[in-house]
Image (cartoon, helix red, strand yellow):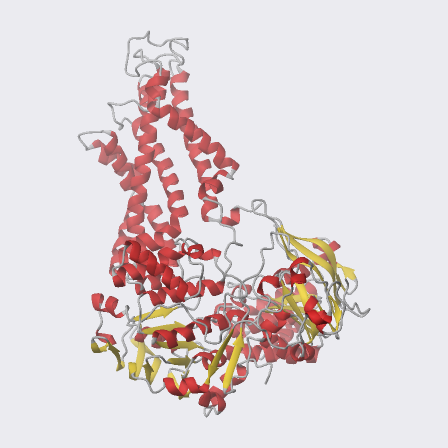
Amino acid sequence: MTTTPVTDPQGVGEPQLAPEETVEVRRPDPWYRVVWSSSKARVGLVIVAVYVLVAIFAPLIAPHDPTNSDFVPLAGPSAENWLGTTTNGQDIASQLIHGTRISLLVGLFGGLLATAIALVIGMVSGYAEGTLLDDALTFLTNVALVIPVLPLIITLVAYSDTRGVPLIVAVIAITSWAGAARAKRAQIITLRNRDFVTASKFAGDRTLRIVFAEIMPNMTSLVAAGFVGAATGAIGAEAGLAILGLGDSGSVSWGTMLYQANAQGAIAQGLWIWVFVPGLVLGILITAMTFVNFGVDLLSNPHLRED
Amino acid sequence: MTTATSPDALLEVDGLSVRYEPKRNPSLTAVSDVSFSIRPGEFVGLIGESGSGKTTLGTALLRLLDRPARISEGSVRLDGTDITALSEDELRPLRWRDVSTVFQSSMNALNPVIRVEAQFRDVIEEHSGLRGDAVTERVRELFDMVMIDHRFIRAFPHELSGGMKQRVNLALALALEPKVVLLDEPTTGLDVVVQHSILENIRRLQREKGFAVLFISHDIGTVLDLSDRILVMYAGRIVEENDAASLLRDPMHPYTKGLLGSYSDPRAETVRITYVPGRLPDLTKDVTGCPFVARCPERISLCESVTPAFAPLAGGDVACHVARVQRGGEVDGLAAADVGEPTRRFAGPEFVKTAAESTEALTRPALLSVDSVGKTYERRRGLKVERTVAVDDVSFELRRGEVTALVGQSGSGKTTLARLITGVDKPSTGRIVFHGPDGEQEVAGFRGRALRGYRKHVQMVFQDPYSSLNPAKRIGQALERPLVNHHGLSGRALRDRVRELLETVALTPTERFVDRYPHELSGGQRQRVVIARALAAEPEIVIADEPISSLDVSIRAEILELLGSLVREHDMGILYITHDLLSARMLSDEVLVLNDGRVVERGPTLDVIRSPRDEYTRRLLDAVPNPFG
């Protein structure tokens, strides 16, 4: 087989009239511009960016070591202790600033891990829809959906020897992937019968490549939205665990602050800043992440973009 | 610039412009300064390619435009009332009672959870005094009009076939005896035979009931058959208007000639069809000169600078400098000597098929033998097993350098045969033998690695170029996959081969296409990429499953021409699957007509088309629109 260009047997050259034109169609906006176009997402992104900066530069920003208990206990706000001190004589402001690190770390890795599990299980089961493999994976997903998550997390954490951040991340991820896996399975079922998938088979691609290199790029917006949602959930879950006293006792997080405040009867003693402030920063962060998701939604649903 | 506005016009459109003004993208004028009128009982066709603004115009006439589109100028008068000035509440009683419509996507126009009868009842009770049994009686009448059995009155939409749904939509549109009915490609996506019978039905009803019709289509063949008068639309403007007979006899605008060029008499010894190359101009930019200039074979230098006015000429109206001067009109700065004689032909690229070529091709050695193949699908329902015979006792041979066409309606077993030949399914009876480089091999025996190896020799071209290219991948990436997998190419050799492939399908200069995403290409260009991808494996056999049916009629020849040249130059065999006998005539040497999984007629294409022996073949042939017949 030769590959000479098509010679026109009639002598009526095809490109002779009009050169092939392509440029009329505008490329769609890049994803960052789409996300930025939503005012809610802009607010959310700015707030999240502030949190990230605080987390990165925590040792520079925080006036003291968060575990240092040399201050006068139960002091009110002052130039020395911006938000006062705890019953143990620790600086609340420094604890708050260092706590950002744990929350964001858990959010990032918990979100990533949950998304990764959801992707693998959802994509494989959706692509194999109707087979035994799909039945097994769907069963697993359904089980993960109906198991009461909170008791499971508490049990898992309570029985583990080391309560480091990696454990918290892992526990949160393996209890929160199921819903996202369902969504991805549904999405790939609508995509897998497109002709381009058949075309990939004819191009000689293997199944895993088809699923993850051909089909998955068409679901990036769904995956991104899933990640932001999972990360938000992970931040909340970490705080929740810590409040129950199941957090990483060696490190300072907003959740452990709340746990300590509760344990020391902060409200009864009128130390409302100690309780209120960690809850507030946590609330703001989760709200900001939800706002970011409004922008990510625009990626997957172009109909929301107009007007 | 108003057209012949007769005082008795029912619908009068004057200087109508529609602009799309999205916030984040540049705005564009989709319909610009369109004027025409429709008299009571008149059947008017509106034709133009996808993107020419015809659907936007239709939507504007109904005042159904959604943001970001809006009517920016002009008026639409219905019976003397300017509906562009009415409020939504004033419009509501007019819609459906005076103007009704049948939309393009018949499948989605009916509410899936409500019985058909209730949908009729809603409409009739809202707009008329009929109640109770009188409504039922009216629904029966309407079902008789569109020739559907009364037992479907109580059905849910999913119980109806595609053709029946569209008939129900037509009946719904006619329920209140409107004065004007707007039909927006009402038969696109339906089978040729079904399409034919629905169009006949529409024409008969229109004559009987005397309503006026505006029929929107990209297919000049169907419109010419039906219409009294034709409007040709290009880039948002009406470029020619004439009665159907005059337009066919003496098309004035080169674009009209281009559209007409996509039809030819399939019975002729040598068939020629032309196509309009290139694509619509970018409407977000100001158009200077004639909008058609880049694609026009008759252009002169004046066309690039001065926009031709749309004005009466030789009994019709046209917007073309050349046509005007050729027919004795006057254009500033242009003398009769500057232009040639008027022609009927579109002097663009064309595709020619002669009978002699086919005779030669049928003597070549066989590549694939299909030997009394049958396929029965079994479905278990409780204790019973339901058997569906999809293909029954089909035999044929596909030869090197030859095209065999499988022709039939949907459900005739064409696609099942393609699945059997590509090894996706195994035949229940009979065998399919591939005469490849490794000797004779039975297709049903391929599994796993062997199946992947077989697909190096057998490739597919799909029906819809919009779904067969991965929207997330660049053109170059799509072409690389088969080269990497089937030929182990990499690095420089890979890039060179991708460029060669793009040249083969005439997408040049190639560097402008390698990094494009599919949505940046026109339908015809995409289909060429799909063909290039099929060629990348250097196959012996290409199965083309309706490769042109989702493309505009005016560019179909572009793809047929490419496929035809591949057969000649690459010595491959093409199995061309279609429901359209005209395109089968253009491309194929041998034709098999399938009906209910059986071959009802088989023979050299020209013989079958000239003297069809089977009743079913004749019905398929009748359904091919033939403006010249």
Residue furthest right in the image: B7
Q: From the image, which quarter does the N terminus of chain B lie in?
A: bottom right
Q: Write down the quadrant of residue A261 in the picture.
A: top left
Task: Quarter of the image for the C terminus of chain B: give it.
Answer: bottom right
- Residue B150 position within the rendered picture, expressed as x and y whole percent measured from the top left: 56, 78
Is residue B156 at all visible to an observer of this figure? no
Where is residue B550? Give x, y as percent. 48, 68
Q: Nearer the viewer, residue B229 or B569?
A: B569
Q: Is residue A31 left or right of residue B250?
A: left
From what the image shows, is residue A101 above or below residue B569?
A: above
Q: Is residue B399 visible?
A: yes
Foreground of the two, B68 or B125: B68
Count the labels in the image. 0
* In the foreground, B459 or B545: B459
Q: Residue furthest top?
A: A72
Residue B483 falls in image quadrant: bottom left
Q: Nearer the viewer, residue B541 or B23?
A: B541
Q: Position of residue A152 (x, y in %)?
A: 26, 38
Q: Residue furthest front?
A: B337
B357, above or below B485, in the image: below
Please tell me which residue is depicted at 49% across the width and 83% down the height of the picture: B620
Q: Is residue B94 left or right of residue A227?
A: right
Residue at 35%, 12% in the rendered image: A85
Residue B475 point in image, percent of width and height: 40, 57
